[in-house]
Image (spheres, rainbow, N blue to C red):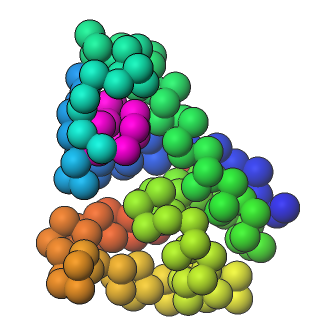
Amino acid sequence: MVNNLKTGPNGLALVRSEEGTIYHLYNDVAHNCTVGTGHLVHMGPISGAASEAPYVHGCSAAQELANLQHDLSYAEHTVNFHVTVVLNQNEFDALVDFTFNEGSGTFQRSTLLQLLNAGKKSALPAEFAKYNEAGGKVSKDLTDRREHEVTLFQKPV
């Protein structure tokens, strides 16, 4: 592995701003029981299931952070494992947000990863922008998210 990074403060801020943080149980857009920053408690809506018990009175900031770091660890591993060029912290954080949102499989199969590993970082803004659809339609939220990822990716450290 060329990189062995963890998400930094700028990356955590980006994920939180894009995902939103709610400190009580809620049903996400897919109607799954969720808490904090998109932390899946269980599939299906809030139902009083045993997995909800730790969050019945909401979650603390410490719980939210621990859950978020755990959830991001999968995206971090994917980026660290599959990227073969050295990344700075902001580049890594932007790629983790992308992978967290789009999924590890999408990142692994992406032209974005191929171009990155070929050393063509200048081509990446256009590649990020291609991932802006939900349900076959352009999503303003995803378009904005990709722009925010590009901004962070290009931000000097």
Residue at coordinates 31% horizontally, 36% vertically from top-left? Answer: 34
Q: Which residues are magenta?
A: 32-43
Q: Is residue 72 visible?
A: yes
- Assign the magenta stretch its main secondary structure: strand
Location of residue 70 by image quarter? top right
Of 41 and 92, nearer the camera is 41
Q: Residue 38: x and y, percent?
A: 35, 42
Q: Is residue 2 left or right of residue 38?
A: right
User: Is there any visible trace of residue 21 in the rendered image?
Assistant: no
Name the foreground residue: 39 vs 61: 39
Query: What quarter of the picture does the N terminus occupy?
Result: bottom right
Q: Residue furthest top?
A: 57
Please tell me in which quadrant of the rendered image residue 126 appears.
bottom left
Q: Could you tell me how many numbered marks the image carries?
A: 0
- Residue 101, image x and y in percent? 41, 61
Residue 1 vertical position relative to residue 9 in the rendered view, above or below: below
